[in-house]
């Protein structure tokens, strides 16, 4: 049986996960315009990987954690710019694989999920306070 404490813990794990997601989006957006002299050197978009975990074995309540952060597999964009100081021997510079539109969508989704978890926290707190008042 899920308790109010379990509900608060589930929401907290979601808030932590969404905070990590928002931080990776911020990092990606900050590096979206970076360039380098090779595809290997350029900043690659970061993607958090989430996994479900049991927060309470007895009640079987589950939460989420960011188990790792990986680099996106999307290729870097090669741009012919022979006069650029970072151009390789063939005259190419490489732009980060960060897709700003995807990042904005991911940020919006993470923000909405975080706000939903805050509402769960508030509701659980209100129920807990009502329960305490009923016991008096």
Image (spheres, rainbow, N blue to C red):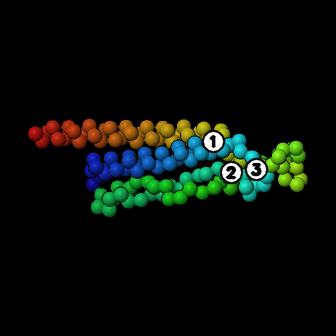
Rendering coords of residue 42 (x, y %): 72, 52
**Residue drawn at x 63%, y 42% as measured from the top left:** 30
Q: Quadrant of the C terminus?
A: top left
Q: Which mark is residue 74?
A: none
In the image, taking residue 95 as reference, residue 82 lies left or right, namely right
Name the residue beneath numbered marker 3: 36
| Viewer-closest of 52 and 68 | 68
Q: Earlier in the sequence, mark 1 or mark 2?
A: 1
Q: Which residue is mark 2?
A: 43
What separation in Å lies between label 1 and label 3 (alpha carbons)? 15 Å
C-beta proximity under 8 Å, tags 1 and 2: no
Q: Is residue 99 visible?
A: no
At 32% from the left and 59% from the top, the residue drawn is 56
Drawn side of residue 84 relative to residue 31, left or right: right
Task: Identify which residue is drawn at 54% across, 37% down.
Answer: 108
Q: In the rendering, at what x and y percent does residue 133 appear? A: 15, 37
Q: Are marks 3 and 2 in contact (CB under 8 Å)?
A: yes
Quarter in which the N terminus is drawn: bottom left
Which badge, 3 or 2, comes first in the chain's sequence?
A: 3
The residue pinned by badge 1 equals: 30
């Amino acid at each position: 049986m899920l308790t109010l404490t379990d509900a608060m813990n589930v929401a907290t794990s979601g808030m932590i996960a969404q905070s990590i997601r928002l931080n990776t989006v911020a990092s990606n957006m900050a590096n979206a315009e970076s360039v380098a002299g090779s595809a290997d050197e350029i900043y690659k978009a970061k993607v958090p990987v989430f996994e479900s975990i049991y927060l309470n074995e007895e009640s079987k309540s589950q939460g989420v954690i960011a188990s790792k952060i990986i680099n996106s597999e999307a290729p870097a964009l090669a741009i012919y710019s022979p006069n650029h100081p970072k151009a390789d021997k063939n005259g190419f510079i490489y732009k980060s694989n960060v897709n700003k539109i995807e990042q904005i969508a991911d940020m919006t989704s993470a923000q909405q999920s975080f706000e939903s978890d805050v509402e769960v926290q508030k509701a659980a707190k209100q129920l807990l306070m009502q329960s305490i008042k009923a016991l008096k």
